[in-house]
Amino acid sequence: MTALLIRDLRLAMRAGGGFGLGLGFFLILAVLVPLGVGPDTGTLALIAPGILWVGALLACLLSLDRLFALDHEDGSLDLLATSPIPLEGVVAVKALAHWLTTGLPLALAAPVLGILLNLPGPAFAPLMLSLLLGTPALSVIGAFGAALTVGLKRGGLLMSLLVLPLYVPTLVFGAQAVSRAAQGLDGSTALLLTAGITAGSAALLPFAAAFALRINLR
Amino acid sequence: MVWLGGVRRFGYAGFMELRVTDLACARGGLPLIEGLSFAVASGEALVLRGPNGSGKTTLLRTLAGLQPALKGEITCPPEEMAYAAHADGLKSTLTVAENLSFWAEIHGQRDITGALEAMNLTDLAGRQAQHLSAGQKRRLGLARLLVTGRWLWVLDEPTVSLDAASVALFAGVVRDHLAAGGAALLATHIDLGLPEARVLDLAPYRAELPPDLGFDEAFL
C-alpha cells in the first residue's frame, strides 16, 4: 500500500503529473474574481467564502478523471486487481494520494488567496479548517465517480455530472462554516457536518468504488 | 537460479496444480468458450492456440479472476497466478528500476536485481520507461513476473514486439521457472522454443451462440 502511495505521489510530481493543475486553477480563479466583480471590498468579503469553496471543489474535479483512467489505459489497473492488495485498499490509497496532491495544497494556499478576496479576519482559521476537513470527502467521492466511469472513452463529462450532486452537501456545509465565521457567528455545527461527510464517505465509498471497478474491468 | 531470491532458490513449495473443469466464459455478454477442461501442474507449460477471437484473452482473464466464469470450476485461486497481458502496466515517467521495484513491493518482494539481470535490463535500469523501445518495454513487463513470487504464470501473447534473441531469453526464463516448480499458461501464435510445452487448441471449445440471445445481455 505504501508502495502504491509513493508511486502515485512520485507520478504526480514528475513532469505531466498534474500536481500543479488544481492549485494553478485555484490561484487563477482567486485572482480573476476581484477583477471581474470589481474592487468593492464589501462585496468581495461577502462572496469570498463561497468563491473559495467553489474554486477548491472545481480544482479537485479537474484532476479526477486521471485517477483511474491512466492506470486503466496502461494496464496497471488489471495488474493491481490481480495483486495481493485488495481493490478497496487501492481505491483508498489513490484517493489519499489525490488528496495529498490536490486538497491539501489547496487548503494550505487558501488563506493567501483569502487576502486577495478580502476575507474577514475571523474567517481565516475556519476557512483552512473547513477545507482540511472537507476536501478529503471531495477526493473520496471523486474516486467513486472515477471508478464508475473508468472504462469509458472521454468519461470526464459523465463523471463530472455524476460527482457534482454528491459534492453539494460538502460545499454547502464547508462554505457555510466559513461565511458564518466571517459574519462573526458560530460555524462549528457546519464544520462538524463537513467532517461527518468526510468520515462517512471515507468509510463507505472505497467499497462502492472497488465494486464499480470490478464491474468495469470485466 | 540463485538470482531470484528466497522463493525461487528453494523452488515453490510442494506440488501444485491448476485444474479447470467444464469452464464456460463470455466476452461482452457473448459466450465464447464452453466445455473446456484441462490441467496444468508444477513444472509444466501449456500453450493455448486458436485463431483471433477464439477466446484466449477471455480465458486468461477469467482464470486471473478479472471476470467471472459463466460456469465451471477453477481449482487454483487467482492469488497464486501472475497475470501479464498486452499492456505492461508501466509508467512512462518512472525509470525501469522504479517501475519494477513498485511491482516488487506490491507483491512483498524487495530484490529486483535478479529480475533485471534475467531479462537483460540491468543497463537500462536508470532510464525512464518512455524512452524504451517497444521490445524493451515488453521485457520490463515480463520482468515483473519474476518479482511476483507466484508459481503460475498466465501470459497473454508474451512475445509481442520481442526480437528473436529476446524470445530465446524469455524462453530460458520460463524454463527456469518451470524447473523451480512453477507452471506457465501461454497464449501465443509463435513458436516459443519450448518443445516440452503441451499445446491446447481452443477451436473445438467454441461456444454456440444461443439463437434467442436477449438484447440486454450484451451490456452485462
Image: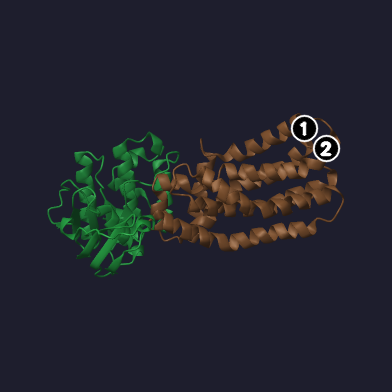
Q: Number of numbered discs present?
A: 2
Residue at the spot x=80%, y=55% of the render?
A187
The residue at the point 67 percent across, 44 percent down is A56
In green, which chain?
Answer: B
Q: Position of residue A144 (x, y in %)?
A: 54, 54
Query: In the figure, A181 relative to A48: above or below?
Result: below
Q: Which mark is residue A43?
A: 2
Q: Tell me the amino acid under the disc marked 2.
A: Thr
Taking depth in this image into account, of B172 and A96 the one nearest to the observer is: A96
Marks 1/2: CA–CA distance: 8 Å
Q: Which of the 4 image quarters holds residue B218?
A: bottom left
* Residue identifier under label 1: A37
- Residue A2 location in percent, x, y? 51, 55
Badge 1 vs badge 2, beta-carbon distance below 8 Å: yes
Dot 1 falls on a residue whose secondary structure is helix
Quarter of the picture holding the C terminus of chain A: bottom left
Quadrant in the rendering for residue A21: top right
